[in-house]
Image (tube, helix red, strand yellow):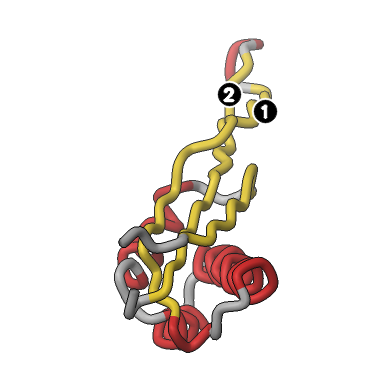
């Protein structure tokens, strides 16, 4: 029997993927209630972005599928790199130095755990 997955995707978040990945590793495979508590009390900027995407996936499950949020589990969670913003600043001897600011795409999928 296949279970229905509900997904949410936060695209072009202005934070580096390496800063979000430790938070993603903590919630993968957990119940939604536990994952939200972990993210709420974690002192990382990436957890704020991830919590918003997770809450969006839970809202999608509640509105589209009519599923109780207490029955959901985080099935898949990943962070991919988005585009890179390039800025230039002056360097020595008349040259310019490049600063690269990375963006990330945050993907979260939740599904009913007992199905």
Q: Nearer the viewer, residue 56 or 92?
A: 56
* Disc 2/disc 1 C-alpha distance (Å): 6 Å
Specify whether residue 42 is in view. Answer: no
Q: Residues within 10 Å of mark 1 (few under 14, many from 20)?
A: few
Q: Residues within 10 Å of mark 2 (few under 14, many from 20)?
A: few
What residue sits right under mark 1 in the picture?
A: 87
Q: Nearer the viewer, residue 108 or 91?
A: 108
What residue sits right under mark 2 in the picture?
A: 98
Specify whether residue 62 is in view. Answer: yes
The N terminus: image quadrant: bottom left
Q: Is disc 2 placed on a helix, strand or loop?
A: strand
Give the percent coordinates (x, y) of residue 32: 45, 80
Give the percent coordinates (x, y) of residue 50: 53, 65
Picture quadrant where residue 94 is located: top right
In-image side of 53 versus 111 (left or right): right
Picture quadrant where residue 27 is located: bottom left
Q: Which mark is residue 104?
A: none
Rendered view: 48 above or below 18: below
Give the percent coordinates (x, y) of residue 55: 60, 73
Q: Residue at x 59, y 51 (%)?
A: 9
The C terminus: image quadrant: bottom left
In-image side of 33 versus 8 (left or right): left
Q: Residue at x 37, y 58 (%)?
A: 76
């Amino acid at each position: 029997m296949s279970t229905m997955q509900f997904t949410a995707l936060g695209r072009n978040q202005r934070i580096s993927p390496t800063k979000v990945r430790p938070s993603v590793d903590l919630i993968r495979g957990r119940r939604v209630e536990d994952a939200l508590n972990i993210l709420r009390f974690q002192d990382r900027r990436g957890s704020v972005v991830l919590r918003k995407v997770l809450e969006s996936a839970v809202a999608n499950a509640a509105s589209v599928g009519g599923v109780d949020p207490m029955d959901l589990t985080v099935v898949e969670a990943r962070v991919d790199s988005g585009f890179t913003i390039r800025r230039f600043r002056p360097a020595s001897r008349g040259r310019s130095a490049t600063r690269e600011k990375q963006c990330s795409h945050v993907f979260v999928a939740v599904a009913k755990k007992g199905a």
